[in-house]
């Protein structure tokens, strides 16, 4: 996100109006959103929390890239808060007939969609839309190229806090295709804001981030060194859809042998270290299936937290709208 876009996220009273990135959200706002999300969690098997706080509002899901978790959880989050939810099927929309993204947005704006949840493969699209919508419309970034995935960063932060809230004494290791990962970017922004003790980014050199992209993080190329005494281990898939030329990217067996997070490779981490993955997982490539299904794994907890975090964000935006 461009530097001046961080102010675009707030209205003239300082309320969150758009969620484009976690840059510019301070520790107290991140904490408030996590605290609110905790209030939406119920025990497995119990009925979900419901309210009518967004009754009368319309949330539009516009996913110009595939998604299971983010799209489904924004859909459920909106409905559980009493909103009407429109899931635009992009593959059968008039975008396929050449309509521009802004014309699609203006069309939905005319239909009184108040909150648009946008996922797109190109850099800068959520902020571009936010600059063009009417003053009463809010834009939530649901995944932007390799740049940002703010609600994923929030749900990852909440999942880590549930394991250990003492961020300053935590070692967090993120392993995989760091260079093309918006999940790593948003997690890094959130963790740095919360004062994480140490953030390690582990990848083969060919998938390492460019200089300066992750300020404050340690870039490591050896898995055992990166996982040593870690409290949190997050595995990321190789984002093949964002890699033009796969030359130099290790094959599956070589990748798993050197960078796979497994019951064996995680032995050097802290004995109670948790294992995370944003999904979708490629079992047997970046993570061993048996580890993903083991008691150390908090992957399904991340998914549950995802609905709660998106409810917290939607509710915050709805409150801002009702204060106008
Ligand atoms: N983590 C995540 O964004 O998953 P989806 O692509 O399924 O939404």
Image (tube, rainbow, N blue to C red):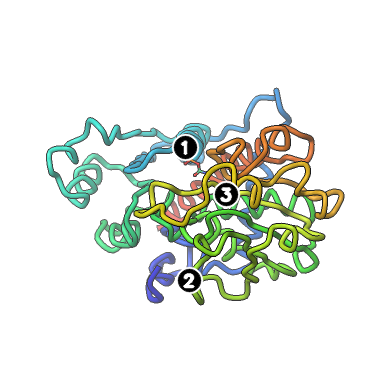
Residue 181 in the figure: left or right of residue 268: left
Nearest the eye: 169 or 181: 181
Whether label 2 lies within 8 Å of ligand 1 gets the answer: no
Of pointers 2 and 1, the one earlier in the residue sequence? 1
Residue position marked by numbered label 3 in the rendering:
236
Task: Look at 47% across and 32% down and name the residue there.
Answer: 79
Q: Name the residue under label 1.
A: 78
Q: Which mark is on residue 188?
A: none
10 Å crowding of disc 1: few (<14), some (14-19), many (20+): many
Disc 3 residue crowd, few under 14, some 14–19, many 20+, Cα 10 Å: many
Precedes in sequence: disc 1 or disc 3: 1
- Identified at 38% across, 40% down, the residue is 59
Image quarter of residue 263: top right
The quarter of the rendered structure image containing the C terminus is: bottom left
Find numbered disc 3 in the image and state the secondary structure of the residue it sits on: loop
- Residue 212 is situated, as x and y percent measured from the top left of the image, at 51, 76
Give neighbour class at mark 2: few <14, some 14-19, many 20+ (Cα, 10 Å): few
Whole-percent x, y for residue 192 in the image: 63, 69
Q: Do the residues labelled 1 and 3 touch (CB within 8 Å)?
A: no
What residue is at 38 percent from the left and 68 percent from the top? 8
Residue 210: image tag:
2
Q: Is mark 2 on a helix, strand or loop?
A: loop
Q: In which quarter of the image is the N terminus?
A: bottom left
Q: Earlier in the sequence, mark 3 or mark 2?
A: 2
Q: In this view, does 176 lie above or below 63?
A: below
> What is the C-alpha distance between the residues marked 1 and 3?
28 Å
Q: How many marks on residues?
A: 3
């Amino acid at each position: 996100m461009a530097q001046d876009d961080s102010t675009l996220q707030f209205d003239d009273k300082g309320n969150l109006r758009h969620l484009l990135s976690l840059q510019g959200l301070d520790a107290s706002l991140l904490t408030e959103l996590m605290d609110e999300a905790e209030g939406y969690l119920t025990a497995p098997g119990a009925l979900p929390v419901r309210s009518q706080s967004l009754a009368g509002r319309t949330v539009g899901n516009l996913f110009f890239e595939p998604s299971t978790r983010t799209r489904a959880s924004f859909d459920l989050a909106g409905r559980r808060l009493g909103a009407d939810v429109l899931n635009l099927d992009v593959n059968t929309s008039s975008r396929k007939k050449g309509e521009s993204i802004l014309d699609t947005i203006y069309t939905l704006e005319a239909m009184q969609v108040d909150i648009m949840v946008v996922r797109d493969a190109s850099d800068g699209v959520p902020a571009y839309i936010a600059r063009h919508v009417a003053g009463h419309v809010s834009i939530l970034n649901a995944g932007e190229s390799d740049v940002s995935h703010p609600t994923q960063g929030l749900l990852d932060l909440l999942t880590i806090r549930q394991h250990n809230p003492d961020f300053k004494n935590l070692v967090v290791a993120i392993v995989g295709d760091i260079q093309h990962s918006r999940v790593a970017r948003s997690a890094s922004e959130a963790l740095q804001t919360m004062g994480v003790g140490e953030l390690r980014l582990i990848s083969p050199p060919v998938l390492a981030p460019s200089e300066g992209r992750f300020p404050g993080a340690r870039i490591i190329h050896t898995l055992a060194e990166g996982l040593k005494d870690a409290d949190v281990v997050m595995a990321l898939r190789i984002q093949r859809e964002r890699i033009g030329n796969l030359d130099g990217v290790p094959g599956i067996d070589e990748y798993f042998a050197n960078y796979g997070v497994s019951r064996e490779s995680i032995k050097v981490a802290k004995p109670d270290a948790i294992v995370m993955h944003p999904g979708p997982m490629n079992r047997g490539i970046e993570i061993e299936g048996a580890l993903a299904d083991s008691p150390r794994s908090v992957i399904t907890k991340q998914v549950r937290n995802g609905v709660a975090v998106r409810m917290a964000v939607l509710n915050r935006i709805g409150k801002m709208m009702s204060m106008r």
